[in-house]
Image (cartoon, rainbow, N blue to C red):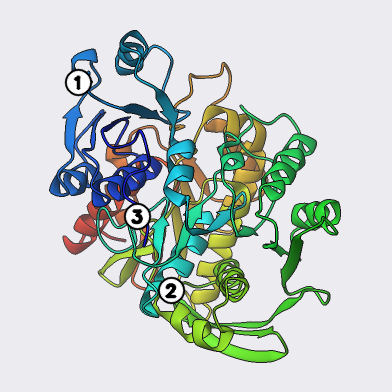
C-alpha cells in the first residue's frame, strides 16, 4: 500500500496546476489525502477534474492565491522567476519544490518504472500502465497525456508498481531512482538546455546511474543514439541491460509489424518465446513502444505471455494519433508530433494504414512548437512534411519562449517546398477549417499535428465537413 502524502506535501500549492505533468502529481496527492491548491492561466478539463477531487484552483496568477498555510509550492521549469506566487512563497518562507522532486517523493516506497527518451514516453508509459491495470495489478502512474478522459493522466493505485514518464528536457529525470528504466531513443532536442549530443548522452548516463542496484535498463537496439548510450553503460555493476528492437543482436526481438487499418499486429520474441499481440495505433514506432513496455514488464516480474495480450487493452492517448471523428468520408486525426523524427514516424504510420485505400490522401495542418526547435530543426520538419500529399503550416507556437529574430515558420515551408512538398503558410488559425475542408475528398485523412493549440482545430474541420464544405 502506498503511503499518504509525502512529508511536507500535505498542503501543496501548484503554480500551473493544469499542465500535463503538474496536474497528474496534484491528482495523486489529492487521492492520497493532501489538501491541494493551485493556479492556472485558464480553465481546462484538467482543472475541472482536479476540482472534482476537492482541489482549490484559481484562474490567473496572483500572490493572494497562495495560502500562507501551504507547506510547499510546486513549480515546473516553465514557471518564470517573476511569477507572483513564486515570489510570495519566497517572502513567506514556504519551500519551493520542483515538479520532479514532488513526483520522486510520490514514488518512495514503491517499485518505480521510469520511461525516458526523446520520443514516445507518453505512449509507452500509457501502454504499460493500462496493461498492468487490466491485469488487476492497480499500478500508480503519472503520464504526460490523458488516456480516455480528462484527468486520467494519473492514478494513485494500491499496487506496488509506479509507472512514470521521466522528462529529459530540463534534466529533471535525474531526480528519480527507478527499479526499471526504459530509454526509447536518444536524440538532440530541447536546444535551450542542451548544446550537443555529448551533453544529451551525459544527461542520459546520469539517469541510468540512478537505476537502483539490481535494477534493469530496457533500451532500444535500433536507434543510433540509444546504441551509443548502451555501449557507455553496459557492464556497470548491479545493472542488467535488456535491448529491444529489430536488430539481430536485440535481446527482445521485434519480428514483424503488420498493419491492420489503424491498428497493428506485432510479433516479438522474448526469452525464447514468440508472442503475437495487437497494438491499437498504427506504425512500427508505436509497435516498438509496445515491445519496450513488454520488456519492462518482464523485468518487473510480469510473465510476457500474460502481459502481451493485456497490451491490447491500451486504446490510445489523447493527441497520439487520436481519431477525432469522420465526416463526409474524411477522417480527422490529431497528432502531438513536433520533432522531425516523430513527424516522420506518424506520417509513415498513417501511410501504412491507408495502404489498402488507393487514392486516399494525407493532408496535414502543422504547427511548429518553440522558436529554438524550429531554428535548429526547421529544415528537417519541412522534409518530414514531404510525406504528406499537402500541408498547411501555421505560425510558431511559442509556449515558454520569446521570439528569436529571423526564426519563423517560413523556414519549414521553404524546406518542405525544396523537398517537393505541396505546402502553404497559413497565419490565421481561423482560416484552417474552411481551407482543409475545401481541399478534401471522400477517403482522405486530415492530420492536425503539433504540441500547441493546433489540436483545437479538429472539431472545426469536422463541422465544416459535416456541412458539406469539401472538395
Badge 3, how many Cα within 10 Å: few under 14, some, many 20+? many
Counting residues from the N terminus, which is met first, the one under dot 1 or under dot 3? 1
Q: Quadrant of the N terminus?
A: bottom left
User: Up-down: is 353 above or below 180?
Assistant: below
Q: Which mark is residue 42?
A: none
Residue linked to disc 3: 154
Q: Position of residue 379 (x, y in %)?
A: 66, 39
Distance from Cα at disc 1 to Cα at disc 3: 25 Å
Counting residues from the N terminus, which is met first, the one under dot 2 or under dot 3? 2
> Visible in this render: residue 446?
no
The reply to whether dot 1 and dot 3 touch (C-beta < 8 Å) is no
- As helix, strand or loop, the secondary structure at mark 1 comes to helix
Horizontal side of residue 417 vs 59, given as left or right: right
Q: Which mark is residue 132?
A: 2
Task: Examine the image and state in which quarter residue 471 appears.
Answer: bottom left
> Visible in this render: residue 243?
yes
Identify which residue, 377 or 148, lies in the foreground.
Answer: 148
Counting residues from the N terminus, which is met first, the one under dot 2 or under dot 1? 1
Q: Position of residue 9 (x, y in %)?
A: 33, 36
For image coordinates 32% across by 31% down, the residue present is: 16
Residue linked to disc 1: 65
User: Up-down: is 97 above or below 436?
Assistant: above
Badge 2, how many Cα within 10 Å: few under 14, some, many 20+? many
For image coordinates 41% across by 58% down, the residue present is: 141
Horizontal side of residue 349 vs 107, given as left or right: right
Amino acid at each position: 500500500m502506498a503511503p499518504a502524502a509525502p512529508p511536507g506535501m500535505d498542503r501543496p500549492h501548484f503554480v500551473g496546476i493544469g499542465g500535463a505533468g503538474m496536474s497528474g502529481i496534484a491528482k495523486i496527492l489529492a487521492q492520497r489525502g493532501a489538501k491541494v491548491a493551485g493556479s492556472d492561466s485558464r480553465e481546462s478539463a484538467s482543472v475541472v477534474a482536479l476540482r472534482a477531487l476537492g482541489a482549490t484552483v484559481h484562474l490567473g496568477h496572483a500572490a493572494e492565491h497562495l495560502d500562507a498555510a501551504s507547506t510547499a509550492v510546486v513549480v515546473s521549469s516553465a514557471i518564470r522567476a517573476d511569477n507572483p506566487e513564486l515570489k510570495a512563497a519566497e517572502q513567506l518562507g514556504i519551500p519551493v519544490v520542483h515538479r520532479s522532486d514532488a513526483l520522486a517523493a510520490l514514488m518512495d516506497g514503491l517499485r518505480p518504472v521510469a520511461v525516458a527518451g526523446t520520443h514516445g514516453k507518453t505512449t509507452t508509459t500509457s501502454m504499460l500502465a493500462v496493461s498492468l491495470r487490466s491485469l488487476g495489478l492497480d499500478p500508480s502512474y503519472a503520464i504526460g497525456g490523458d488516456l480516455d478522459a480528462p484527468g486520467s493522466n494519473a492514478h494513485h493505485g494500491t499496487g506496488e508498481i509506479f509507472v512514470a514518464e521521466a522528462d529529459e528536457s530540463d534534466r529533471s529525470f535525474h531526480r528519480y531512482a527507478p527499479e526499471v528504466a526504459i530509454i526509447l531513443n536518444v536524440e538532440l532536442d530541447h536546444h535551450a538546455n542542451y548544446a550537443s549530443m555529448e551533453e544529451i548522452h551525459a544527461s542520459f548516463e546520469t539517469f541510468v546511474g540512478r537505476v537502483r542496484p539490481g535494477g534493469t535498463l530496457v533500451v532500444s537496439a535500433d536507434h543510433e543514439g540509444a546504441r551509443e548510450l548502451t555501449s557507455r553503460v553496459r557492464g556497470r555493476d548491479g545493472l542488467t541491460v535488456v535491448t529491444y528492437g529489430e536488430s539481430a543482436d536485440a535481446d527482445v526481438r521485434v519480428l514483424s509489424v503488420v498493419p491492420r487499418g489503424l491498428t497493428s499486429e506485432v510479433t516479438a520474441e522474448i526469452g525464447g518465446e514468440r508472442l503475437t499481440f495487437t497494438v491499437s495505433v498504427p506504425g512500427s514506432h508505436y509497435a516498438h513502444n509496445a515491445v519496450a513496455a513488454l520488456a519492462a514488464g518482464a523485468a518487473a516480474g510480469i510473465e510476457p505471455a500474460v502481459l502481451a495480450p493485456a497490451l491490447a487493452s491500451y486504446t490510445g492517448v489523447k493527441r497520439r494519433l487520436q481519431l477525432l471523428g469522420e465526416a463526409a468520408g474524411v477522417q480527422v486525426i490529431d497528432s502531438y508530433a513536433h520533432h522531425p523524427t516523430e513527424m516522420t514516424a506518424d506520417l509513415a504510420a498513417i501511410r501504412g494504414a491507408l495502404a489498402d485505400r488507393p487514392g486516399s490522401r494525407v493532408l496535414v495542418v502543422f504547427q511548429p512548437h518553440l522558436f529554438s526547435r524550429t531554428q535548429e530543426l526547421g529544415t528537417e520538419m519541412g522534409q518530414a512534411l514531404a510525406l504528406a500529399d499537402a500541408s498547411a503550416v501555421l505560425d510558431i507556437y511559442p509556449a515558454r519562449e520569446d521570439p528569436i529574430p529571423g526564426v519563423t515558420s517560413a523556414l519549414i515551408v521553404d524546406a518542405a517546398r525544396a523537398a517537393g512538398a505541396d505546402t502553404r503558410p497559413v497565419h490565421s488559425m481561423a482560416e484552417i477549417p474552411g481551407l482543409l475542408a475545401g481541399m478534401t475528398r471522400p477517403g482522405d485523412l486530415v492530420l492536425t499535428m503539433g504540441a500547441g493549440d493546433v489540436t483545437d482545430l479538429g472539431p472545426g474541420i469536422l463541422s465544416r465537413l459535416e456541412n458539406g464544405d469539401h472538395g
